[in-house]
Image (cartoon, rainbow, N blue to C red):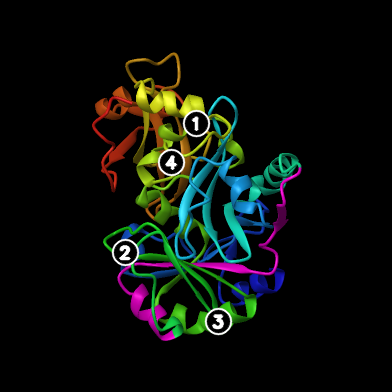
Amino acid sequence: MNNWNEYLSSQGAQLAADGSGHVADFGHALTTAELAAGFVAAITDQGLIAVSGDDAATFLHSQLTNDVEHLGLADVRLAGYCTPKGRLQATFLMWRTVDAVFLQLARDIQPPLQKRLSMFVLRAKAKLSDAGGAMVLLGMGGAAADAALLPLFGALPATPWSRIDHALGTLIRVADVFGAARYQWLATPEAAQAAWPALSGTLRPAGTDAWRLSEIHAGVPQVTLRTQEQFVPQMVNFELLGGVNFKKGCYPGQEIVARSQYLGKLKRRTALATINAPAQAGNEVFAADDPDQPCGMIVNSAPNGAGGVDALVEMKLAAIEQGNVHLGSASGVPLRILPMPYALDALDL
């Protein structure tokens, strides 16, 4: 990974100012228009857990919000891991091979989360290990992405939430955005470095911030250290994205999640907003008509190339509808609510 970051630095990458070692961008934050045209991003904030063994799928099926036992080899799904009170400790991008089930998550929560899951393996034939150390992750999207990737892979995953294995690595198609497909490529540093000149010659080179911005505009949330145990899955629209299976068996928090779905107890959703000020996950937002208590919290944010950030913001439904919401206090910088890429269903959740 260090050699990969050194290579990217030689190509103009700039590291994040927080000392994390993440590749933030290549000189400037991309705008949504630049993302829509076509980009290739070095994603450096993600971790990867491999769960192997005869009981890997059965074990995870009993722990996560989604169906693992019937996860096909070409499938990709979102899944959550909840506390007994139904609050998300982690969100995963999940897929499987013949040897293991893979869970991609925010790197800043991987070590304690992996340790916690391991505690519940007990007598199951399942082993959790860090699978990300020898691999790097690239994200591609926008109108020019397909043409840039086809010469490398020959064929691409046909639909969102599907994947292919290739000699070059694993290529995953995630949620589309801006009318175009988006892909994640899990590769060896050598393969990624060999492909980078061609990809960055066709697509605009970018870092983790650009990928996070594309995720935000796709409406796909990720729980990070700042937001652990803050949200029931429906609060971040997780079931709308296929991240919750209500027909599977029990898992930690299942009763709370099901009750929220079927009894209409939830009054909160996540909306897309733009903010003309710095903001980060975990920051609270306030409605002007109820200034004494927060009406919501930022789930994810990323620089938008226009001097501010775009963000996924979990809020009371009434605050989303009224739109008079501010960062930090009722007199703070206003949020401008943007259209979501999918409907926040008609149920009063």
Secondary structure, mark 3, is loop
Q: Amino acid at mark 1?
A: Phe
Secondary structure, mark 4, is loop
Residue at 65% from the left image edge and 45% from the top image edge: 109
Q: Relative to residue 219, is residue 19 drawn left or right?
A: right
Q: CA distance from mark 4 to mark 2?
A: 31 Å
Q: Nearer the viewer, mark 2 or mark 3?
A: 3
Q: CA distance from mark 2 to mark 3?
A: 28 Å
Q: Is residue 144 above or below residue 109?
A: below
Q: Is residue 164 above or below residue 18?
A: below
**Quadrant showing the N terminus:** bottom right
Q: Is residue 6 visible?
A: yes
Label 1: which residue? Answer: 231
Label 4: which residue? Answer: 245
What x and y, as percent, mark residue 241?
38, 46
Range covered by the magenta-colored residues? 123-151
Residue at 54% from the left image edge and 33% from the top image edge: 250
Name the N-terminal-most of marks 2 and 3: 2
Label 3: which residue? Answer: 167
Look at the image and say whether residue 127 sits in the magenta stretch.
Answer: yes
